[in-house]
Image (spheres, coloured by chain):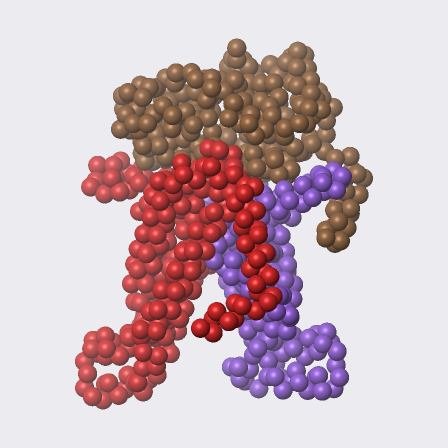
Chain colours: A red, B brown, C purple
């Protein structure tokens, strides 16, 4: 493995030893006795972070496809709202969007008492639907912009050839246009997913208990400040690493250049 | 290292030139009627006036620094502020990390819920209900210790817990009685009422509200204690309290 | 309804508009400071990554990887509390008194460190896009490295760096919102205070959103002008690659 040889350079060995020393120092001098006690809660929080991430990315991408298509090829009355949506989402902080959805909508509830009688109320009462909605819309806004470029980037010749062969429009979209656009967007998708992961702790501000909120809870219960935050940073780095590896694997499975 | 020492020396010189004021940390989130920003951006409220009075009585030059409630103790220990005057109760748990002055007020803890919903302020009455509390407060600790049969939601600010009470996302909230009375007096709070005080547990609910200080800074602690004693003795405390509350809030 | 909303947003008290604008100003100042620090770190970081020794390169790789993998919110909390604490402990151990680091300065520094990691990558990419012949020509003339960087590499890299830097500036303005969570009174926190005090959550969050959007749109327009200026005299827009 060339990878191993790259790590075995003398200066890297020194740096690695230094890093190991720092980690060892942290393990020995900082307080970690709280870890076992909060492990079940942390597992729960981690699970919530992961499914929020997975669902919001999936739904967000499903919304991003029509958003990109509308901007790339739609009539103006579809393109304009899609463009406006992407601009608004990308132009305002996600934190504000989350608060607007959760507290803003919540403040309107008392004016409509029937909401509390409706079948949706058990969901509207909880915080995670708002978190999921806000994260989904945010992902759709950023990825919609990427998909716009991806749809535009598919060579016209490909589409013309399909049309010349008498393919119906739906089939052209399904077989030629969409796969090539997604292929073009794939390299950015990994990066966007990492950015989405980094956005998830914001949901803790609307009472969703994700892994970040658990670290906050440790800090409040025990007044230990740095240790939970350091561990949290390590957890996020591990998830980021997993995402990067997963997308690398995915990209390798898709043939490198279509046609 | 050299540049750091240099930067520190410059900062030190600048600090020495303008007799270092005592930075009093308050919670950056509104907590009416104790401390909240008005429309002009100034902080107002009972506690803000008390800070002014205590500092004047102790002849200290105080500067109010708003800090996130959630991080107010780390801010103190890391030196961004020198004292906490943010309605922080004196508890044994906090005493492990920081020090406190004498108390400057003490009020009971209550449960507030909708008038239309019957409940009592005990574990039985709150069983199966959704209870909202502010994070890092004695109320959080108390609720998590006693109301194990309820779903507990944590809010960054009491205002937001009240907001979700109005929206109907929580059934009840546990908080300081005075803060809740101020909320009940607003149009939004009209549909709610105090369901009762929770059973006292001094180990969790503490011994009243004091000034939070770094451990070992006994000089500063003595000055705050002297200031509090002086405004209690000369009537300033009562004069300020009369503007906000019907009765004295110093407590027994 | 409209009248009520306008009254809430009025610039003079009892309206809260003035507070929002003060918050906006604070946000812009922090974003500007962070962006500036980010540019400085990014420039040195990019040169370090491209031309530095093996140790510098590895350390920079660790820096950019960590910052880009950990949520900004977590980094802000760690840096905000840990760095001020570390500086003070250092001072105390050297026999000095502890100093006060204002939330303002800490906020700018923290966001600047985060920005620096992204700026390093943007500027590195832009420097790589400069035709190597130009830099070699400068070297052949015997220009010292510093002068080469100042007179040749950076000006040529600027045009291809602008879109990436524009994006970073927008991220900086939006990331200031995260300082609301450590209690700094920028636009998002002042909005939250106004909303909490008046209970008009919807109105104020929408108003703040409009302000952020305005900043985004105006900056986008400004950066497009800048890009056009920086590209003057270059063969073609995409040609630098």
Could you say which is closer to the camera, residue B203 or residue A58?
B203
Q: Which residue is located at x 31 percent, y 67 percent?
A: A65
Q: Which x, y percent locates residue C239?
A: 53, 84
Q: Is residue B144 left or right of residue C107?
A: left
Could one spot residue A76 in this view of the protein? no
Image quarter of the N terminus of chain C: top left
Q: Quadrant of residue A215?
A: top left
Does residue A163 sit above or below B92 in this rendering?
below
Relative to A244, say whether B243 is above or below.
above
Q: Of B183 and C159, which appears nearest the observer?
A: C159
Rendered residue at 31%/47% (across/down)? A129
Tag count: 0
Between residues B173 and A108, which one lies in front from this camera angle? B173
Residue at x-position 29% and y-position 27% = B149
Percent coordinates x, y for residue B171 in the rendering: 31, 29
Report whether residue B141 is seen. yes
- In the image, residue B251 sits, relative to residue C90, either above or below, namely above
- Between C150 and A159, the residue placed more toward the observer is C150
Q: Quadrant of residue C140?
A: bottom right
What residue is shown at x 33% (from left), y 19% (from top)?
B122
Q: Measuring from the top left, give residue C127's x and y in whole percent.
A: 59, 75
Q: Position of residue B193 (x, y in %)?
A: 36, 21
């Amino acid at each position: 493995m060339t990878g191993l040889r790259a790590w075995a350079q003398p200066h890297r060995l020194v740096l690695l030893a230094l890093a190991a020393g720092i980690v060892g120092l942290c393990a020995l001098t900082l307080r970690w006795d709280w870890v076992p006690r909060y492990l079940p809660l942390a597992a729960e929080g981690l699970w919530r972070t992961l499914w929020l991430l997975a669902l919001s990315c999936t739904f967000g991408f499903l919304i991003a496809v029509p958003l990109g298509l509308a901007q790339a090829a739609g009539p103006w009355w579809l393109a304009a709202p899609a463009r406006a949506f992407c601009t608004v989402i990308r132009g305002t902080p996600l934190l504000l969007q989350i608060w607007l959805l959760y507290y803003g909508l919540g403040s309107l509830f008392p004016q409509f008492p029937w909401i509390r009688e409706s079948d949706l109320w058990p969901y509207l009462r909880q915080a995670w639907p708002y978190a999921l909605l806000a994260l989904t819309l945010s992902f759709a806004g950023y990825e919609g912009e990427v998909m716009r470029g991806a749809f535009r980037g598919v060579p016209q010749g490909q589409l013309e050839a399909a049309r010349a062969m008498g393919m119906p429009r739906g089939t052209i979209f399904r077989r030629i246009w969409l796969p090539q656009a997604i292929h073009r967007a794939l390299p950015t998708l990994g990066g966007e997913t990492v950015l989405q992961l980094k956005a998830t702790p914001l949901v803790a501000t609307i009472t969703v208990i994700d892994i970040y909120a658990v670290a906050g809870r440790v800090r409040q219960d025990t007044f230990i400040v740095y240790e939970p935050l350091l561990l949290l940073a390590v957890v996020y780095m591990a998830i980021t690493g997993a995402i990067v590896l997963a997308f690398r694997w995915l990209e390798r499975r898709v043939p490198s250049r279509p046609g | 290292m050299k540049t750091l020492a240099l930067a520190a020396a410059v900062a030190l010189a600048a600090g020495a030139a303008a007799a270092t004021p005592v930075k009093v940390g308050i919670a950056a989130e509104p907590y009416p009627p104790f401390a909240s920003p008005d429309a002009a951006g100034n902080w107002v409220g009972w506690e803000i006036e008390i800070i002014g009075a205590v500092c004047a009585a102790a002849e200290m030059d105080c500067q109010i620094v708003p800090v996130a409630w959630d991080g107010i103790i780390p801010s103190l220990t890391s030196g961004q502020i020198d004292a906490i005057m943010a309605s922080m109760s004196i508890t044994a748990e906090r005493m492990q990390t920081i020090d406190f002055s004498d108390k400057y007020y003490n009020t009971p803890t209550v449960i507030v819920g909708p008038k239309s919903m019957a409940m009592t302020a005990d574990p039985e009455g709150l069983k199966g209900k959704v209870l909202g509390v502010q994070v890092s407060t004695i109320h959080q600790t108390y609720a998590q210790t006693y109301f194990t049969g309820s779903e507990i939601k944590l809010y960054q600010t009491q205002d937001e817990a009240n907001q979700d009470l109005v929206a109907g996302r929580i059934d009840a909230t546990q908080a300081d009685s005075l803060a809740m009375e101020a909320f009940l007096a607003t149009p939004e709070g009209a549909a709610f009422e105090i369901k009762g005080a929770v059973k006292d547990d001094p180990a969790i609910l503490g011994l009243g509200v004091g000034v939070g200080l770094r451990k070992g800074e006994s000089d500063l602690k003595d000055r705050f204690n002297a200031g509090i004693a002086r405004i209690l003795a000369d009537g300033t405390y009562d004069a300020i309290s009369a503007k906000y509350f019907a009765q004295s809030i110093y407590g027994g | 309804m409209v009248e009520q909303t306008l009254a809430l947003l009025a610039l003079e008290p009892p309206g809260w508009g003035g507070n929002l604008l003060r918050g906006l100003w604070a946000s812009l100042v922090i974003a500007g400071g962070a962006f500036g620090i980010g540019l400085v770190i990014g420039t040195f970081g990019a040169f370090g990554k491209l031309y530095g020794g093996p140790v510098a390169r590895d350390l920079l790789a660790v820096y950019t990887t960590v910052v880009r993998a950990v949520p900004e919110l977590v980094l802000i909390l760690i840096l905000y509390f840990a760095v001020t604490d570390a500086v003070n402990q250092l001072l105390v151990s050297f026999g000095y008194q502890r100093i006060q680091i204002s939330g303002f300065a800490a906020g700018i520094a923290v966001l600047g460190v985060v920005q620096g990691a992204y700026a390093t990558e943007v500027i590195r990419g832009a420097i790589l896009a400069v035709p190597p012949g130009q830099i070699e020509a400068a070297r052949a003339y015997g220009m010292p490295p510093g002068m080469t960087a100042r007179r040749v590499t950076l000006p040529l890299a600027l045009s291809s760096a602008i879109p990436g830097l524009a994006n970073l500036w927008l991220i900086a303005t939006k990331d200031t919102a995260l300082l609301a969570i450590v209690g700094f009174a920028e636009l998002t926190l002042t909005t939250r205070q106004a909303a909490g005090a008046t209970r008009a959550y919807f109105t104020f969050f929408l108003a703040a959103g409009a302000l952020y959007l305005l900043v985004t749109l105006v900056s986008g327009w400004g950066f497009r002008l800048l890009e056009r200026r920086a590209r003057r005299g270059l063969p073609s827009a995409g040609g630098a690659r």
